[in-house]
Image (spheres, rainbow, N blue to C red):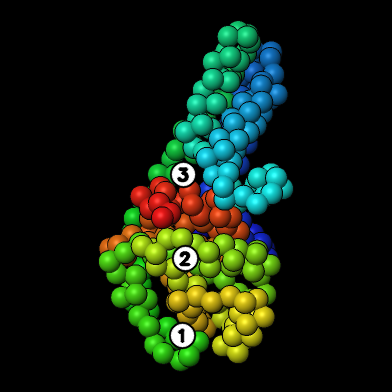
Amino acid sequence: MTAVNVGPLALPLSPLLLLISVLLGLLVAALVGRKYNVSVTDPLLTLLLGSLLLGRLVFVARFADSYNSVWQMLDIRDRGFDTTATLLGALMILVWLLWRRKQQRQALLAGVLTVTMLFGVFSSVIYIGRQQATLPELTLQQLKGDSVNLAELGRGQITVVNLWATWCPPCRREMPVLQQAEQDYPEVRFVLLNQREHPETVQQYLQQAGLTFQYLLLDRQGQLATQLGAHGLPVTLYFGAEGQLLNSHMGELSAASLAQSLQQLGVGAE
Protein backbone atom coordinates (compact mmCIF):
# COMPACT_ATOMS: atom_id res chain seq x y z
CA MET A 1 0.00 0.00 0.00
CA THR A 2 1.37 3.42 -0.99
CA ALA A 3 -1.45 5.70 0.14
CA VAL A 4 -4.53 5.99 2.32
CA ASN A 5 -7.83 7.15 0.88
CA VAL A 6 -9.57 9.90 2.86
CA GLY A 7 -12.76 10.70 1.00
CA PRO A 8 -11.72 11.82 -2.50
CA LEU A 9 -8.09 12.32 -1.43
CA ALA A 10 -5.23 9.81 -1.57
CA LEU A 11 -2.61 10.68 1.06
CA PRO A 12 0.96 9.28 0.81
CA LEU A 13 1.39 6.66 3.51
CA SER A 14 4.87 7.43 4.90
CA PRO A 15 4.37 11.20 5.42
CA LEU A 16 0.95 10.49 6.93
CA LEU A 17 2.41 8.01 9.42
CA LEU A 18 5.19 10.47 10.28
CA LEU A 19 2.56 13.14 10.96
CA ILE A 20 0.61 10.76 13.21
CA SER A 21 3.81 9.87 15.07
CA VAL A 22 4.67 13.55 15.58
CA LEU A 23 1.19 14.41 16.84
CA LEU A 24 1.23 11.53 19.32
CA GLY A 25 4.75 12.51 20.38
CA LEU A 26 3.57 16.06 21.05
CA LEU A 27 0.66 14.68 23.09
CA VAL A 28 2.94 12.48 25.20
CA ALA A 29 5.39 15.36 25.70
CA ALA A 30 2.55 17.65 26.77
CA LEU A 31 1.29 15.12 29.31
CA VAL A 32 4.76 14.61 30.79
CA GLY A 33 5.39 18.36 30.68
CA ARG A 34 2.23 19.00 32.64
CA LYS A 35 3.58 16.81 35.42
CA TYR A 36 6.69 19.01 35.64
CA ASN A 37 4.79 22.23 34.85
CA VAL A 38 6.71 22.87 31.62
CA SER A 39 5.83 23.11 27.93
CA VAL A 40 7.93 21.53 25.17
CA THR A 41 5.78 22.07 22.09
CA ASP A 42 8.01 24.80 20.68
CA PRO A 43 11.30 22.91 21.28
CA LEU A 44 9.92 19.76 19.67
CA LEU A 45 8.70 21.68 16.62
CA THR A 46 12.10 23.35 16.43
CA LEU A 47 13.69 19.91 16.48
CA LEU A 48 11.41 18.61 13.72
CA LEU A 49 11.60 21.63 11.41
CA GLY A 50 15.33 22.18 11.96
CA SER A 51 16.24 18.59 11.13
CA LEU A 52 14.00 18.57 8.04
CA LEU A 53 15.53 21.84 6.85
CA LEU A 54 19.02 20.41 7.17
CA GLY A 55 17.95 17.23 5.40
CA ARG A 56 16.50 19.25 2.53
CA LEU A 57 19.57 21.48 2.20
CA VAL A 58 21.90 18.48 2.03
CA PHE A 59 19.60 16.76 -0.47
CA VAL A 60 19.54 19.82 -2.73
CA ALA A 61 23.34 20.13 -2.50
CA ARG A 62 23.77 16.47 -3.46
CA PHE A 63 21.48 16.69 -6.46
CA ALA A 64 22.00 20.33 -7.45
CA ASP A 65 22.62 19.36 -11.08
CA SER A 66 19.10 17.91 -11.26
CA TYR A 67 17.43 21.27 -10.61
CA ASN A 68 16.74 23.93 -13.21
CA SER A 69 15.71 26.73 -10.87
CA VAL A 70 15.69 27.89 -7.26
CA TRP A 71 11.93 27.35 -7.20
CA GLN A 72 12.42 23.65 -7.92
CA MET A 73 14.86 23.48 -5.01
CA LEU A 74 12.27 25.04 -2.70
CA ASP A 75 9.45 22.82 -3.92
CA ILE A 76 9.30 20.01 -1.34
CA ARG A 77 6.41 18.20 -3.00
CA ASP A 78 8.94 15.67 -4.29
CA ARG A 79 9.72 14.87 -0.62
CA GLY A 80 13.44 14.97 -1.29
CA PHE A 81 15.35 14.80 2.01
CA ASP A 82 18.71 13.33 2.90
CA THR A 83 17.90 10.76 5.61
CA THR A 84 21.35 10.74 7.21
CA ALA A 85 21.54 14.52 7.41
CA THR A 86 18.00 14.70 8.82
CA LEU A 87 18.80 12.19 11.59
CA LEU A 88 22.12 13.83 12.44
CA GLY A 89 20.43 17.23 12.51
CA ALA A 90 17.74 15.92 14.85
CA LEU A 91 20.38 14.42 17.14
CA MET A 92 22.42 17.63 17.31
CA ILE A 93 19.37 19.80 17.97
CA LEU A 94 18.15 17.36 20.63
CA VAL A 95 21.51 17.43 22.43
CA TRP A 96 21.50 21.23 22.34
CA LEU A 97 17.94 21.39 23.69
CA LEU A 98 18.70 18.93 26.49
CA TRP A 99 21.72 21.02 27.48
CA ARG A 100 19.89 24.36 27.38
CA ARG A 101 16.51 23.27 28.81
CA LYS A 102 17.28 21.10 31.81
CA GLN A 103 13.79 21.44 33.31
CA GLN A 104 12.24 20.14 30.10
CA ARG A 105 14.49 17.12 29.64
CA GLN A 106 12.00 14.47 30.72
CA ALA A 107 9.23 15.82 28.51
CA LEU A 108 11.56 16.31 25.53
CA LEU A 109 12.90 12.78 25.77
CA ALA A 110 9.40 11.36 26.18
CA GLY A 111 8.20 13.15 23.04
CA VAL A 112 11.24 12.23 20.94
CA LEU A 113 11.18 8.58 22.02
CA THR A 114 7.47 8.33 21.25
CA VAL A 115 7.94 9.72 17.73
CA THR A 116 10.99 7.52 17.10
CA MET A 117 9.41 4.29 18.31
CA LEU A 118 6.06 4.83 16.61
CA PHE A 119 7.52 5.78 13.25
CA GLY A 120 10.02 2.93 13.56
CA VAL A 121 7.20 0.44 14.08
CA PHE A 122 5.16 1.93 11.21
CA SER A 123 8.19 1.82 8.88
CA SER A 124 8.90 -1.79 9.82
CA VAL A 125 5.32 -2.81 9.01
CA ILE A 126 5.54 -1.04 5.62
CA TYR A 127 8.88 -2.74 4.91
CA ILE A 128 7.54 -6.21 5.76
CA GLY A 129 4.48 -5.65 3.58
CA ARG A 130 6.64 -4.43 0.71
CA GLN A 131 8.82 -7.55 0.86
CA GLN A 132 5.78 -9.66 0.02
CA ALA A 133 4.85 -7.63 -3.09
CA THR A 134 6.19 -8.61 -6.50
CA LEU A 135 5.72 -7.56 -10.10
CA PRO A 136 2.60 -9.54 -11.03
CA GLU A 137 1.97 -11.76 -14.05
CA LEU A 138 -0.23 -9.33 -15.94
CA THR A 139 -0.71 -9.31 -19.70
CA LEU A 140 -1.14 -5.72 -20.86
CA GLN A 141 -1.42 -3.96 -24.20
CA GLN A 142 0.93 -1.53 -25.86
CA LEU A 143 -0.46 1.40 -27.83
CA LYS A 144 0.06 -0.51 -31.08
CA GLY A 145 -1.93 -3.43 -29.70
CA ASP A 146 0.90 -5.86 -28.93
CA SER A 147 0.57 -7.88 -25.70
CA VAL A 148 3.30 -7.71 -23.04
CA ASN A 149 3.69 -9.74 -19.86
CA LEU A 150 4.63 -7.31 -17.12
CA ALA A 151 6.55 -9.81 -14.98
CA GLU A 152 8.61 -11.01 -17.96
CA LEU A 153 9.29 -7.44 -19.01
CA GLY A 154 10.88 -6.64 -15.67
CA ARG A 155 12.76 -9.91 -15.18
CA GLY A 156 16.53 -9.62 -14.82
CA GLN A 157 16.88 -5.86 -14.25
CA ILE A 158 15.66 -3.06 -12.03
CA THR A 159 12.30 -1.88 -13.31
CA VAL A 160 10.56 1.41 -12.58
CA VAL A 161 6.80 1.31 -13.13
CA ASN A 162 5.02 4.66 -13.23
CA LEU A 163 1.23 4.73 -12.89
CA TRP A 164 -0.23 7.79 -14.59
CA ALA A 165 -3.14 9.29 -16.53
CA THR A 166 -3.49 12.19 -18.95
CA TRP A 167 -6.01 14.01 -16.70
CA CYS A 168 -3.53 14.08 -13.78
CA PRO A 169 -1.51 17.38 -13.63
CA PRO A 170 1.40 16.04 -11.51
CA CYS A 171 1.59 13.03 -13.84
CA ARG A 172 1.99 15.35 -16.82
CA ARG A 173 4.63 17.44 -15.03
CA GLU A 174 6.81 14.43 -14.25
CA MET A 175 6.60 12.81 -17.68
CA PRO A 176 9.61 14.75 -19.10
CA VAL A 177 11.61 13.67 -16.04
CA LEU A 178 10.85 10.02 -16.79
CA GLN A 179 11.59 10.44 -20.47
CA GLN A 180 15.01 11.91 -19.67
CA ALA A 181 15.66 9.19 -17.07
CA GLU A 182 15.03 6.51 -19.69
CA GLN A 183 17.99 7.93 -21.60
CA ASP A 184 20.20 8.56 -18.55
CA TYR A 185 19.74 5.10 -17.00
CA PRO A 186 19.89 2.52 -19.82
CA GLU A 187 20.44 -0.24 -17.25
CA VAL A 188 16.97 0.43 -15.79
CA ARG A 189 13.74 -0.51 -17.52
CA PHE A 190 11.10 2.22 -17.32
CA VAL A 191 7.47 1.20 -17.82
CA LEU A 192 4.83 3.91 -18.17
CA LEU A 193 1.56 2.27 -17.19
CA ASN A 194 -1.47 4.33 -18.15
CA GLN A 195 -4.49 3.88 -15.91
CA ARG A 196 -7.98 3.23 -17.28
CA GLU A 197 -7.83 5.43 -20.40
CA HIS A 198 -8.62 4.78 -24.04
CA PRO A 199 -5.60 4.25 -26.34
CA GLU A 200 -6.60 7.17 -28.57
CA THR A 201 -6.64 9.54 -25.58
CA VAL A 202 -3.16 8.42 -24.56
CA GLN A 203 -1.77 8.59 -28.10
CA GLN A 204 -3.16 12.08 -28.64
CA TYR A 205 -1.62 13.36 -25.42
CA LEU A 206 1.80 11.88 -26.17
CA GLN A 207 1.83 13.44 -29.63
CA GLN A 208 0.82 16.85 -28.31
CA ALA A 209 3.43 16.72 -25.53
CA GLY A 210 6.16 15.38 -27.79
CA LEU A 211 6.83 12.38 -25.52
CA THR A 212 8.08 8.94 -26.49
CA PHE A 213 8.77 5.90 -24.30
CA GLN A 214 10.08 2.48 -25.13
CA TYR A 215 7.54 0.75 -22.91
CA LEU A 216 4.18 2.45 -22.56
CA LEU A 217 1.44 0.04 -21.56
CA LEU A 218 -2.30 0.35 -21.02
CA ASP A 219 -3.89 -0.93 -17.81
CA ARG A 220 -7.50 -0.41 -18.81
CA GLN A 221 -8.85 -2.00 -15.59
CA GLY A 222 -6.27 -0.65 -13.13
CA GLN A 223 -5.20 -4.20 -12.28
CA LEU A 224 -1.70 -3.41 -10.99
CA ALA A 225 -2.92 -0.58 -8.76
CA THR A 226 -5.60 -2.84 -7.31
CA GLN A 227 -3.23 -5.74 -6.63
CA LEU A 228 -0.54 -3.60 -4.96
CA GLY A 229 -2.82 -1.11 -3.20
CA ALA A 230 -1.38 1.80 -5.19
CA HIS A 231 -4.12 4.34 -4.59
CA GLY A 232 -3.99 7.78 -6.19
CA LEU A 233 -1.84 9.11 -9.02
CA PRO A 234 0.94 9.40 -9.85
CA VAL A 235 2.62 6.40 -8.22
CA THR A 236 6.13 5.17 -9.00
CA LEU A 237 7.10 1.61 -8.05
CA TYR A 238 10.69 0.32 -7.99
CA PHE A 239 11.16 -3.42 -8.58
CA GLY A 240 14.37 -5.43 -8.27
CA ALA A 241 15.82 -7.83 -10.81
CA GLU A 242 13.88 -10.71 -9.21
CA GLY A 243 10.60 -8.80 -9.41
CA GLN A 244 10.39 -7.85 -5.72
CA LEU A 245 9.03 -4.43 -4.78
CA LEU A 246 11.94 -2.44 -3.30
CA ASN A 247 10.52 1.07 -2.96
CA SER A 248 7.57 3.25 -3.90
CA HIS A 249 6.78 6.94 -4.25
CA MET A 250 3.26 8.33 -4.24
CA GLY A 251 3.13 11.83 -5.73
CA GLU A 252 5.09 13.89 -8.22
CA LEU A 253 8.68 12.96 -8.95
CA SER A 254 11.49 15.40 -9.57
CA ALA A 255 14.70 14.51 -11.37
CA ALA A 256 16.44 14.75 -7.99
CA SER A 257 14.05 12.47 -6.07
CA LEU A 258 14.17 9.91 -8.89
CA ALA A 259 17.98 10.03 -8.89
CA GLN A 260 18.03 9.52 -5.11
CA SER A 261 15.73 6.49 -5.30
CA LEU A 262 17.85 4.91 -8.03
CA GLN A 263 21.05 5.61 -6.10
CA GLN A 264 19.57 3.80 -3.11
CA LEU A 265 19.11 0.79 -5.40
CA GLY A 266 22.74 0.98 -6.53
CA VAL A 267 22.07 2.65 -9.86
CA GLY A 268 24.09 5.65 -11.07
CA ALA A 269 23.68 7.80 -14.16
CA GLU A 270 26.25 7.32 -16.90
The relative height of residue 33 versus residue 252 in the rendered view (above or below) is above
Q: Quadrant of residue 172?
A: bottom right
Residue underneath mark 2: 183
The relative height of residue 133 versus residue 48 in the rendered view (above or below) is below
- Give SS at disc 2: helix
Identified by mark 2, the residue type is: Gln
Identified by mark 3, the residue type is: Phe
2 and 1 marks in contact (CB < 8 Å): no
Residue underneath mark 3: 122
Residue 75 visible? The answer is no
Question: Are there few (<14), some (14-19), or many (20+) residues within 10 Å of tag 3?
Answer: some
Outermost residue on the front side: it is 270
Q: Nearer the viewer, mark 3 or mark 1?
A: 1
Residue 266 is labelled as none
Dot 3 or dot 2: first in sequence order is 3
Question: Are there few (<14), some (14-19), or many (20+) residues within 10 Å of tag 1?
Answer: some
Query: How far apart are the alpha carbons under marks 3 and 2?
Result: 36 Å
Residue 212: image x %, image y %? Answer: 54, 77
Residue 3: image x %, image y %? Answer: 55, 58
Identified by mark 1, the residue type is: Gln
Query: How far apart are the alpha carbons under marks 2 and 1?
Result: 20 Å
**Front residue of this view, candidates 122 and 264:** 264
Residue underneath mark 1: 142
- Give SS at disc 3: helix
Residue at (54, 44) in percent of width and height: 63
* Direction from residue 252 to residue 157 in the image, left or right: left
Residue at (68, 14) in percent of width and height: 38
Residue 91: image x %, image y %? Answer: 51, 23
Residue at (53, 32) in percent of width and height: 86
